[in-house]
Image (cartoon, grey):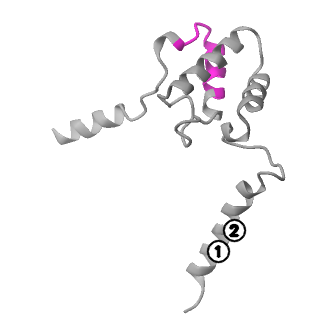
Amino acid sequence: MKYLFIFLSFLYLNVLAIEPNEILEDGDLEKIAVEISKELRCLVCQNEDIHNSNADIAKDLRILVRKKLESGESKKEILKYVHDRYGDFVLFSPPFKFQNIGLWIIPLLFFLLMTFFFFRKS
């Protein structure tokens, strides 16, 4: 019985926040919408993409992405629009600029520092 419970819990582990009325009828456009949604960070949840977030702003962004896809805009244009509106924080892979160099260098420095402390001789 406990194995059945574990199996069923793994089935529902990847429950998505997308509501049925948000899904596009065109399968190709829906795939692109999912790709875009996984590249955008939820502004409320912060470490979750808008594809998996239940926040209202994530839902609004998912709807915005789908409307722009239906109007004929490309993935690049949509990402640029959202980036221009919300800044670097909304992207999971922010652009490499002088203003956000810390986002790229601090993890590397932290890794090197921890490696030094872990592997140094006593």
Disc 2 crowd, CA 10 A, few/some/many (<14, 14-19, 20+): few
- On-image quarter of the N terminus: top left
Please tell me which residue is depicted at 64% across the width and 15% down the height of the picture.
66
The one nearer the camera, 8 or 49, is 49
- Where does residue 83 sit, x and y in percent of width and height? 74, 32
Q: In which quarter of the image is the C terminus?
A: bottom right
Location of residue 114 with respect to 51 vertically, above or below: below
Which residue does the numbered mark 1 point to in the structure image? 113
- Quadrant of res 88: top right
Nearest to the observer: residue 104 or residue 33: 104
Q: Tell me the chief SS of the magenta region.
A: helix
| Residue 69 image point, x, y percent | 70, 14
**Circle 1: is it few (<14), some (14-19), or many (20+) Cα within 10 Å?**
few
> What residue range appears in magenta?
22-36
Q: Do the residues labelled 2 and 1 touch (CB within 8 Å)?
A: yes
User: Which residue carries the number 2 mark?
Assistant: 109
Residue that sits furthest to the left in the current view: 1
What amino acid is found at the position of numbered circle 1 in the picture?
Answer: Leu
Residue type highlighted by circle 2: Leu
Answer above or below: position of 81 versus 115.
above
Which residue: 77% across, 19% down?
74
